[in-house]
Image (tube, rainbow, N blue to C red):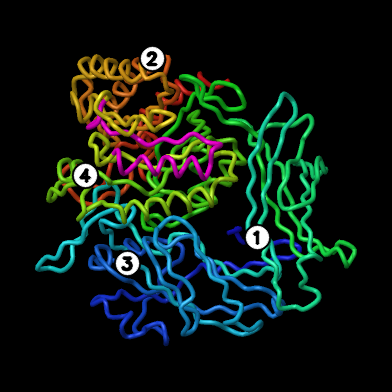
Amino acid sequence: MLRPQDGPTRDRRRLDGLWRFVRDVDGVGRDQGWWRQALQGPRDMPVPASYNDITTDRALRDHVGDVWYQTTARVPRGWAGQRVALRFDSATHRAVVWVGDTQVAAHEGGYTPFEADITELVTAGAGIRITVVVNNELTWQSIPPGVVEDTPDGPRQIYYHDFFNYAGLHRSVWLYSTPRSHLSELTVSTGLDGTTGTVDYGIDVAIDHSGGESARADRHGVRVILRDAAGAEVARGLGTAGQLTVPDVRPWAPGDGYLYDLVAQIIDSERDDEVVDSYTLAVGIRTVEVRGTEFLINGEPFYFTGFGKHEDAAIRGKGHDDVLLAHDVELLDWIGANSFRTSHYPYAEEVLDLADRRGIVVIDETAAVGLNTGIGGGVFGGRRYETFSADTINDATREVHAQAIRELIARDRNHPCVVMWSIANEPESHTEAARAYFEPLFALTREIDPSRPVSFANVGMAPHGKCLVSQYADVLMLNRYYGWYVHSGDLAAAERAWQAELEAWAGDGKPIIITEYGADTLSGLHAVVPQPWSEEYQVEYLEMNHRVFDRIPAVVGEQVWNFADFATKSGIIRVDGNKKGVFTRDRRPKSAAFALRRRWQAMRP
């Protein structure tokens, strides 16, 4: 599935804006066929945005179940004779889509795109009605998982991840056109040999056979052209698969997001190689390798500095916002960070586009967070469930998880910024059931993309010697809170315990990235003697961690939890959300931001 783009043979229209919106209080909309007419009694709802915090309605903020979106659009007259598609960049957590009275799409998973070919349902120049029902329920067979419990006050959503369950149309909706015979898929992998770069490409082509003689497959060939950033051609090839060689290559590298443009074209051999369809893909030529305890980019050891982040902001929730994205990237540069993890779900594609251009390194994570009822029932409260069982997370869940991995890699594999896949965050990993669940998922990920390392974020409940899943990981990703959840307020004891555990992990001979470490901090709270929740304690907590990291050669990265404060469900340990950010939710720096800046700027090459 290629993203919509404007080009010589393609066009697109963004359908963002105010849509009509109705909360399905009693869950009757599907049975009553609400898509067949204009929604009754709607309110205006912005797209993209989470719907939860837009209004002042508590019932909508905490709603469990279906909500309905509807809009109208007009197919441009110039699209006559073209293939027309409708694409949703995401719908959290699942959706069904109708054009007019016809269902055109259904999708499970809240963070990856889906689309429908609606050519036969539309007429160029005419209007269409688009209706979407979005469901936010988390079950044992969803990723992330959860359970809906019936209460006297209605359904109550239980989930096992520590961020608010925002829902809605979080990213853009597109109406776009392509030629009927068109490029349908384009993948690349890159290599380096000294000063020579290589780009291996694979292309899928969909030929329209309804056009008689002009649709003959033997008339259509594929041509690829690689151009540098100045537009000069550096290589070309023919066919749906091949390798391009780039002499005197300029690699994509951390801090230097140099990109080439790969132009793929379908050409008509009986019309002087007339271009039938054309698609342009940004390509960064680089390599990634794990060797012993080193993580290598372009053959050079790389040390990760940065954060686990969230797509989270006041009012819009998880709705994508280019303004906030651009500001966050400026803050990453200011503080000296070179990387982040897409905790705990795939981020908007615009985020990876900008990371490509800025040379920011990304660990790309699925939405498999909360596969650990021990955390949910303990730290965050709630009824205890067995994590893996026939009645909870099971084989059906694993297939949904596998599809999430497939869709993540299909969407993001061409981004040079993505250097590693993380297939889960803090799952239960110390039981035989966990091992059996994850082993085939690691194998699947490597089968789909053998070019990148694969890992997951290990939780402190499964320390060295007890975790049964880390054996499958190429890199050890550890989330640890010594000095916060463990040895809270006692940094000396925390330092000793943390070093002892890290030394044990280092004995496994793999690179180690600390993918979470942090302390909740109330901005403006100060203490002469550093105490938990004060800005001074957050600084000393981070400095303690850094002393430990610097003594363990196998540690190749540090990503603080979190970049900024973020919303969570309510609870006595979460006052107005999680406060572990080194920036506030509105991006004001705490004292820790300046301490990190001093350390990370000094580490820059």
Label 1: how many Cα within 10 Å (few below 14, some 14–19, many 20+): some
Q: Amino acid at mark 3?
A: Thr
* Mark carried by residue 552: 2
Q: Which residues are magenta?
A: 435-463
Residue identifier under label 4 = 574
User: Residue 86 placed where, x, y %?
Assistant: 55, 70
Q: Is residue 29 visible?
A: yes
- Identified at 82% across, 43% down, the residue is 233
Secondary structure beneath label 3: loop
Q: Quadrant of residue 200?
A: top right
Count the numbered circles shown: 4
Amino acid type indicated by mark 1: Gln
Quarter the N terminus occupies = bottom right
User: From the viewer's perspective, is 443 left or right of 239?
Assistant: left
Where 267 falls versus 461 (above or below)? below
Mark 3 residue crowding within 10 angstroms, few (<14) / some (14–19) / many (20+):
some
Q: In the displayed structure, does residue 374 sit left or right of residue 197? A: left
Location of mark 1 (residue): 5
Please name whichever residue, 433 or 467, is drawn nearer the observer in this view of the structure.
Answer: 433
